[in-house]
Amino acid sequence: MGKVYNWQLGREMAYPFEEAHPKRQVAWVFDTNKCIACQTCTIACKMTWTSGRGQEYMFWNNVETKPYGSYPTAWDLAVLEKIGPGRWEQGVYRGRTIFEAADGQAERIAGVLPKDEDWAHPNLGEDEITGGTMPRGAHIDRLPHPVWFFYLPRICNHCTYPACLAACPRQAIYKREEDGVVLIDQSRCRGYRECVKACPYGKPMFRPNHETSEKCVGCYPKLEKGLQTQCVEQCIGKIRGQGFVSDPRGKIREDHPIDYLVHVRKVALPLYPQFGTGPNVYYIPPIHVPPPYLHQMFGPGVEHAIETYRNARQDETLAGLLQLFGSSPEIMDRFEVKDGVARAWDQQGIQVAEVPLVEPPQMRPAYDEKRKVYRLDVT
Ligand code: SF4
Ligand code: SF4
């Protein structure tokens, strides 16, 4: 085992390989407060990548309802049980990652291989609230809510320290130097399913008719053209932003959308950082969910993230940046919020988005002279 520094844990950790990083690391920010579980992202991904025979059950992008939803079934509970209890002390994780919880003999990674039936219920627990039902006549007038659920959209995290890659006995999995995308080389894969077992997020999936494993490819043909992935571009709720994230040990860019949300304002947090893989999908946590549940899921920065997000109305830069989500198919490399307008530029320095913070109201006359009719809706 080598030693690597995992900034999400605030410490060094054991990893089967020495420290190595791509030139750039692709990353996403998902705002859970805006997701409506319309599953447009899921279908956009499925139509693009997994509509073939043997891929029927595959959802490289899925959206599950927490706390009861999970696909494959109980993927997160199974891994949490395997690594055992842990705690955070002043931003440092004191507990075992999936690499440190392995027995070191039969397994290099403490993984869980989902059973066939675990892939049978992608909509398990959908829209179920905690506590079962809302009492008749009840209303919710405070935060966090006493009964709750929220939607958690999930893709492969294109991790900094991928467990799938570390587990593959064929070295069929690699992390691209140019963008950090993690891919399975189909010509090398023999379908041993070690990656399916090792990934703590349940994201590699076995394709029986090809006898190989497959996973989210980060829409790399689009990335190469400077375009955002299908799940980001098609998102109805405009909850998703995508770009490249800096390693906080290097230079952080305040004018970069992802760096700003992850490192500067720390409003977007990694999913289950304690697993140790360094996931690169960052989540703005839901403001209505009790923090103890969110601590386990997103680590110790939850209160700060929620407070920052709730203050966004008085925070022009943050509000403007969030407004830019979903306003351009191009990857945004730089942003600026000035005089009530948010603007973004792509990697070539071409402006790709311009959004006002407040939409000016448009009024139409109540009587339409041309059509000789009255309007009910004039705004
Ligand atoms: S398309 Fe966007 S809003 Fe709809 S489910 Fe996916 S992430 Fe949520
Ligand atoms: S989320 Fe899983 S499949 Fe994706 S890179 Fe990380 S360990 Fe590999």
Image: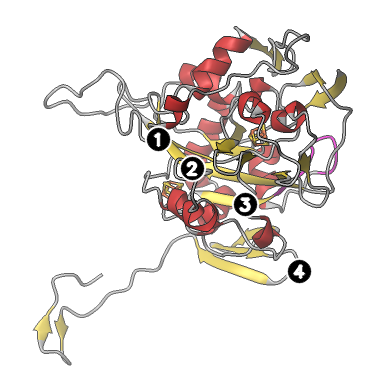
Give the mark, 3 or 1, whose residue is nearer the N terminus.
Answer: 1
Residue that numbered label 1 is attached to: 122
How many other residues sit within 10 Å of disc 3, few (<14), some (14-19) or many (≥20)? many
Q: Which residue in the rendered view is the most extreme toward the bottom? A: 370
Q: Nearer the viewer, residue 133 or 103?
A: 103
- Label 4: which secondary element: loop
Residue that numbered label 3 is attached to: 242
Q: Nearer the viewer, mark 3 or mark 1?
A: 1
The spot of residue 50 in percent (x, y) is 51, 50
The spot of residue 41 in percent (x, y) is 46, 51
- Label 3: which secondary element: strand
Which color mode does the image show? secondary structure
Residue in the image at 33% along x and 33% along y: 126
Q: Nearer the viewer, mark 4 or mark 1?
A: 1
| Distance CA(mark 2)–CA(mark 4) | 33 Å
Residue in the image at 67% along x and 38% along y: 280
Residue that numbered label 4 is attached to: 348
Amino acid type of the residue tagged 1 in the rendering: Pro
**Dominant SS type (magenta):** loop
Find the magenta span and give its range. Answer: 244-251
Q: Are marks 1 and 2 in contact (CB under 8 Å)?
A: yes
Is residue 294 shown to the viewer in this render?
no
Q: Considering the image in quadrants, where does the C terminus appear?
A: bottom left
Is 102 above or below relative to 170? above
Amino acid type of the residue tagged 4 in the rendering: Gln
Q: Nearer the viewer, residue 133 or 196?
A: 196
Residue that numbered label 2 is attached to: 59
